[in-house]
Image: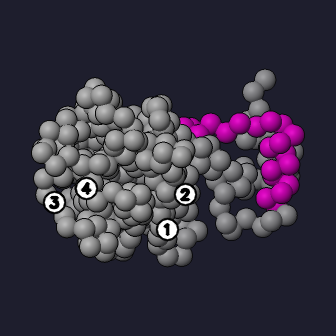
Amino acid sequence: MKVTINDVAKLSGVSIKTVSRVINKEASVRQATREKVLAAVSELNYQPNLAARSLAGTSSYTIAYIYDNPNAYYIIDMQNGILNECRKQDFELVIHPCNSKSGDIVDEISNMIRHSRIAGVVLTPPFSEMEDVIQKLHDMGVKFVRIFSGNKSKDNLSSCIMVNDFDASYELTKHLIELKHKDIGFICGGKEHKSTDERLNGYKAALTDHDIAINNDYIVDGEYSFESGVKGSEALLQLKNKPTAIFGCNDEIAAGALFGSRLQNIKIPDQLAVVGFENSPFSRQTWPQITTADQPNQTIAENATSMLISDIRGTNKELVCEQFVPKLVVRGSSNKEE
């Protein structure tokens, strides 16, 4: 016979409402009562029905992850991180992919939130950087947390996690300069992502600080894809004054650049150094493996989800912002000694 909330209430000697408050992790329950209820839950192996829990009351215990990103590894890391935290905190997760370039994207997101009874939303780029989406969620009174590229939030509309792409990109470029590279190509990611600008600006700042002139011929437009890396490397290596190093705006681009360079019989890193960004599996699936900046996306997603649930429950007295600075990981694509 299936164990019910009534069984837990009876064994612990409290009301059904008190059991519900403990399961929902409400802060107002006395510690002794909480421990008694949790002991009964453990003894009976009670598994609350989260969907029924949301339907039974006015509160929702479902959050949504809304995304539009071509990088499958990024999406998987984010999904896993969010799901891990949801399971810890007894929340459900709705995953909603959508097209950020759609003309009715704001209506699509707001309709999804209403129909699914969403309590909060985890926003990743480009949605976390789209002012119309952010303002709509704020106007709807929906809790949300943003993960975005930068080192400062320009408003106080939500809790957020900032990824300091600028500083990490600076360190990657500095690494190449310290290896005596001056002619360094840069293959950009999608223009709709703020991370592209932050990483490009970090690259430019490092060159400037080391008295190396910025050569616009070395900066190639692209997208966050392997194919973009292949095409970008082809364009750079056709220049009369070829670069001796290429910075791919993420690991997928860098892997494509490494592949495209090898098609031209260029030895890595003897004739050309290649670096990427994020430390995704792409950086470890090439030979040599790719020097990169470690961006712990799963941890970032877990922290963002914890922030969101705390905001939903009202346990955060004020908005919270955290910053991650991806760390340099040196591998064989740039260092001959690796």
Cβ–Cβ under 8 Å for marks 1 and 2: yes
Q: Which of marks 2 and 4 is nearer the N terminus?
A: 4
Q: Callout 4: 10 Å neighbours few (<14), some, many (20+)?
A: some
What's the residue at 84%, 37% (across, down)? 44
- Residue denoted by label 4: 183
Compared to residue 199, the image places residue 101 above or below, namely above
**Residue 276 in view:** no
Residue 115: x %, y % from top left: 34, 41
- Helix, strand or loop at mark 3: loop
What span is in magenta?
Answer: 33-59
- Helix, strand or loop at mark 2: helix
The quadrant of the picture occupied by the N terminus is: top right
Residue type highlighted by circle 2: Asn
Label placed on residue 303: 2
Alpha carbons under labels 1 and 2: distance apart: 9 Å
Label placed on residue 322: 1
Cβ–Cβ under 8 Å for marks 3 and 4: yes
Alpha carbons under labels 3 and 4: distance apart: 8 Å
Nearer the viewer's eye, disc 2 or disc 4? 4
What's the residue at 73%, 51% (across, down)? 19
